[in-house]
Image (cartoon, rainbow, N blue to C red):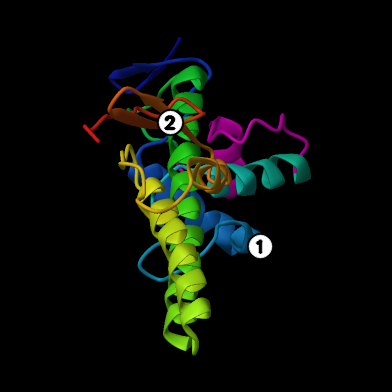
Amino acid sequence: MEQFGENTIPTVAVYVDKATVTAVQAALKAHGYGSKLGKTGPNKDGVDGDYGPKTAAAVKALQAATGQAQTGQIDQGVLLSLGVSAPTSGAVTATEAASVLADATQKAHQEEALSDASDQLTAAKAKVAAATTPAAKTAAKAQLQIAQTQFNAAQPNFLLREVPGVERPVWQVGLAGLGILAVTVGTYTLLGRGHGGKSRRRRA
């Protein structure tokens, strides 16, 4: 343990608090790593104060360039390299920081899946509107049902009943592309994410 002022922090101090992460992101941007931070934050420059996968990737790039262990975590070496002052409190362990990053990564994957599903839903609606024959309209509506199911299933912890008129194998194949597990038990269809996200249930 090391003493900083009146606060005792772990020898391997790692920071994930918003103020420190914001300062580190701004410094990473100033040092040429801004392209790795993404387009989040009020200025769409990746400076948002959230320690997530893109910030970790930018930190790893800095660590690689400066000969440090590529952990992706904001430790004393990273702060020193960027000229950011270390806080006197708020440090966490490397394990705790890894947990924060894991949660942020899962959230990012969910948001990406939702964005992709939203694009597919928009395209399916356009096909229905553009269909000029009854057969084409019917086919487009079937695809729209699947797209709507995928969009709904991409919501965090979402449960949806089986879609009328869509065969179960087709429906489950569509969900598989989003990493959704679908299990039917009696009158219930349970949906959950393969990476361990919580599932809920609703009577069919």
Tag 1: amino acid: Gly
Q: Is residue 47 left or right of residue 82?
A: left
Which one is in front, 170 or 175? 170
Residue drawn at 57 percent across, 55 percent down = 28
State the image coordinates of residue 96 (x, y, percent, origin top left).
44, 21
State the image coordinates of residue 153 (x, y, percent, origin top left).
39, 46
Tag 2: amino acid: Val
Q: Which region shows up in magenta?
A: 66-85
Q: Main secondary structure of the magenta part?
A: loop
Residue furthest front as drawn = 134
**Numbered badge on residue 16:** none
Residue 82: say if magenta: yes
**Numbered badge on residue 32:** 1
Is disc 1 surrounded by few (<14), some (14 to 19) or many (20+) residues within 10 Å? few
Q: Which residue is mark 2?
A: 100
State the image coordinates of residue 172 (x, y, percent, origin top left).
51, 41
Q: Identify the mark nearer the N-term, 2 or 1.
A: 1
Which secondary structure, mark 1?
helix
Residue drawn at 43 percent across, 64 percent down = 118
Which quarter of the rendering shows the C terminus? top left
Which secondary structure, mark 2?
helix
Residue furthest top as drawn = 1
Q: Is residue 119 left or right of residue 148?
A: right
User: Disc 2 to disc 1, how far (Cα)?
Assistant: 25 Å
Q: Is residue 71 left or right of residue 39?
A: right
Q: Is residue 121 left or right of residue 169?
A: left
Q: Eyeballing the image, is 123 above or below 101?
A: below
